[in-house]
């Protein structure tokens, strides 16, 4: 495996770890506060971090077309984030997040096959094993698990899959300004939705703000690692590896919330992990 390909795999897995921890933090905060308030504040935190990173690296501002792709990605990501956080709040974290991940990974794989050419048979086998593993993790264990948050999880998957595809169109040497554009758009959209609802007390309480800020920081980390991974390799490889984030969500839910990890879900996690060397081949 060449240096760039190795870097793409490592960055994709880093994106998965950061996103998984961020989704756990955001979902946990949403159980204690209004979902829109959590998203608005976490997005604002992330926007500030991205602007600071772009300024610290002295990155030149991206062309208008690149920023437009970033904005479109931000709109898709905002839809996905609001839907996911709400689904995590009302459903079982260990089931909701993987459903989203399967759809979010499948869309870029199909798009990359059309735009970049089909991947090797070994990588395809890895994709199939990873998606099967994530789906196994996601299988509802009863009627209640199937109903709670499933529709929102599917909507989130469409949003995140769209984000992967659109932000990939904005990739260039300077990675942070397209992400600034994406985060600014998603921040504006979520704030507008929150204000349009005219709900009182939608902002998170002071005691929850550290958890919300952590969700924003980790989400930014996932975004940055993904863009860097896509720059170093193929979109489908980066997207599938990044979409393994439910493993981190499930692990944290098990440790912190004592959610049960059944043998079936443990098998799914094992399959997803076994897929990594095939994808990296």
Image (tube, rainbow, N blue to C red):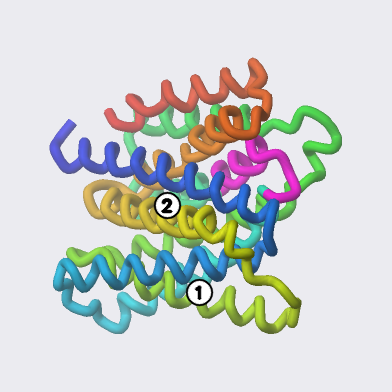
Give the number of marks: 2
Q: Write down the residue under mark 2.
A: 218
Q: Quadrant of residue 85?
A: bottom right
Tell me, for residue 187, which label it has, or none. 1
Against 122, residue 67 (above or below) is: below
Q: Nearer the viewer, residue 40 or 170?
A: 40
Crowd rating for badge 1 (residues with CA inside 10 Å; few <14, some 14–19, many 20+): many
Cβ atoms at labels 1 and 2 below 8 Å apart: no
Q: Secondary structure at mark 1?
A: helix
Q: Is residue 174 visible?
A: yes
Quadrant housing the C terminus: top left
Measured from the top left, where is residue 63 in percent x and y? 25, 81
Note whether residue 161 is visible: no
Q: Is the N terminus in the top left, top right, bottom left or bottom right quadrant? A: top left
Q: Which residues are magenta?
A: 89-103
Question: 55 and 62: which one is in front?
Answer: 55
Residue furthest to the top: 263
Residue at the spot x=69%, y=51% of the render? 31
Magenta region includes residue 138: no
Which circle marks residue 58 in the picture?
A: none
Q: What separation in Å lies between label 1 and label 2 (alpha carbons)?
A: 16 Å
**Magenta region, main secondary structure:** helix
């Amino acid at each position: 495996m060449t240096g760039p390909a190795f870097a793409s795999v490592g960055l994709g897995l880093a994106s998965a770890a950061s996103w998984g921890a961020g989704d756990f933090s955001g979902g946990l905060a949403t159980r204690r506060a209004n979902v829109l308030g959590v998203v608005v504040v976490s997005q604002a935190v992330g926007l500030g971090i991205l602007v600071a990173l772009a300024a610290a690296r002295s990155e030149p501002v991206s062309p208008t077309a690149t920023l437009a792709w970033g904005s479109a990605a931000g709109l898709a990501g905002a839809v996905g984030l609001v839907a996911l956080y709400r689904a995590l709040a009302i459903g079982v974290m260990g089931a909701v997040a993987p459903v989203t991940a399967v759809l979010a990974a499948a869309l870029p794989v199909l798009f990359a096959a059309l735009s970049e050419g089909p991947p090797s048979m070994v990588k395809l086998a890895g994709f199939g094993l990873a998606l099967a593993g994530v789906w196994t993790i996601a299988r509802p264990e009863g009627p209640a698990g199937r109903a709670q948050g499933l529709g929102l999880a599917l909507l989130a998957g469409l949003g995140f899959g769209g984000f992967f595809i659109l932000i990939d169109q904005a990739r260039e040497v300077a990675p942070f300004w397209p992400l600034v554009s994406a985060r600014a758009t998603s921040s504006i959209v979520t704030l507008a939705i929150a204000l349009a609802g005219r709900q009182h007390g939608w902002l998170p309480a002071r005691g929850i703000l550290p958890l919300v800020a952590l969700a924003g920081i980790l989400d930014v980390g996932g975004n940055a690692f993904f863009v860097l991974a896509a720059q170093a390799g193929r979109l489908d490889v980066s997207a599938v590896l990044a979409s393994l984030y439910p493993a981190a969500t499930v692990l944290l839910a098990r440790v912190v919330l004592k959610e049960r990890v059944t043998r079936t879900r443990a098998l799914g996690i094992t399959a997803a992990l076994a897929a990594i060397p095939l994808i990296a081949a």
